[in-house]
Image (cartoon, helix red, strand yellow):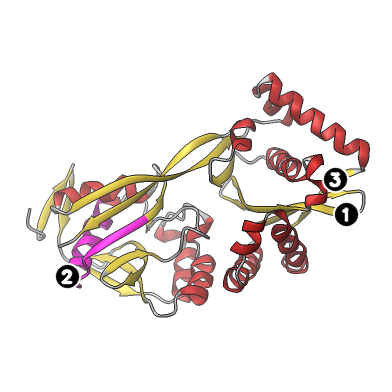
Amino acid sequence: MPDACCRLGATPWLGAASAVPLTFDELMALRADAAQDLVWSFPFMLPPWLKRWWSTFGAGQESLLWQIRDGGDRLLGVAPLRLEGRTARFMGSLDLCDYQDFIVRRGLEPEFFHALLLILRQRGISGLDLSGLRPDSATLRGLPAAAEIRGCRMAMEQEDISCELTLPSSWEAYLAALSGKERHEIHRKLRRMEQSFPLRLETVESLEDVDAAMDHFLHLFRMSRPEKREFLTEARESFVRGMARSLAEEGLVRLHFLVAGRKRVASALCFDFQNTVYLYNSGHDPDYRDLSAGLLCKVLTLRHGIESGRGTYDFLKGAETYKARLGARPVPLYRCRISLE
């Protein structure tokens, strides 16, 4: 079908479209403008996150951070992309960004993705390679239909899973929903730890306190397992520190520590965003592994989310068995590749 005009359902599409480059400060201003009605689905696509990732890992790549506008100069959304060779990818990486997506104006997904494909073709970009896509992402709701209408070849595959839990109204209701075995295990592990040490969950939220506590969080992260120590390269540590500081400035960080007696023995870096708690990463002192310090820290952050009135607890990527044991359900994550030639 010609690019000049096509129809998706009842939505007419006029082919003229434009891509206006954005700075990160301009992206921040767009987020602050509620009238634009842009959907920021996850913390991993917020301006501070994107800015920090790009400043740490963007060297040698071309930024395609664009406002996408139609022929009448109406803002349709934002494409947070980067160019590798002739392939466009999200501005982010799966080792640090669990979910990825476009920032689309509510209800304008068909127009946005038709405009995006038109612009990418006009600029000689050969393809899109997009990872970290949830089934409810704007990308999967709008891009496949637009690609089919425009005659683009598309390949999609499941690349991972994440796990999430709908939180009930009370801790007692959460425990009641578990199997008897898992409920017993949580009680048993808590009792065992409390018989050895006074136990509490310390929660750090303010910018100053998060800054001060990051050394301890990263220390526990490295101690947990050799592969975590190897993962935390100098560049990744710089990103995590800067990202946590930026999100703490917006009040989105919940840095939790499990304190046994007077000692922090486990930690969990969480984000509190749009009624969802995201468990981003964690660590624990291996000397307390036999007392299940790492698991108990996660359990108590889950209880913290319930008591804070949040609706969802997202364990993020990975199929670790403890997530299912704590009641989480799997969510498939997809990779979508589109040829524009």
Q: For residue 200, which numbered disc appears in the image?
A: 3
Q: Is residue 252 left or right of residue 293?
A: left
| Disc 1 versus disc 2: nearer the observer | 1
Using the image as rendered, state which of residue 326 and residue 249 is in the foreground: 326
Q: For residue 122, which numbered disc appears in the image?
A: 2
Q: How crowded is mark 3: few (under 14 residues within 10 Å), some or many (20 or more)?
A: some
Task: Give the Cα separation between the discs numbered 1 and 2.
Answer: 59 Å
Which stretch appears magenta? Answer: 110-130
Q: Which amino acid does label 3 sit on?
A: Arg
Looking at the image, residue 284 lies above or below residue 196: below
Please say if the residues under marks 3 and 1 sit with CB atoms less than 8 Å apart. Answer: no
Element carrying mark 2 = helix
Element carrying mark 3 = strand
Using the image as rendered, state which of residue 337 and residue 3 is in the foreground: 337
Residue beneath the point at 60% across and 67% down: 243
Magenta segment main secondary structure: helix
Q: Residues within 10 Å of mark 1 (few under 14, many from 20)?
A: few
Residue beneath the point at 18% across and 72% down: 124
Task: Give the Cα separation between the discs numbered 3 and 1.
Answer: 10 Å
The x and y percentages for residue 113 are 26, 56
Please identify the quarter of the rendering in which residue 114 is found.
bottom left
Decide whether residue 112 is among the magenta residues.
Answer: yes
Q: For residue 263, which numbered disc appears in the image?
A: 1
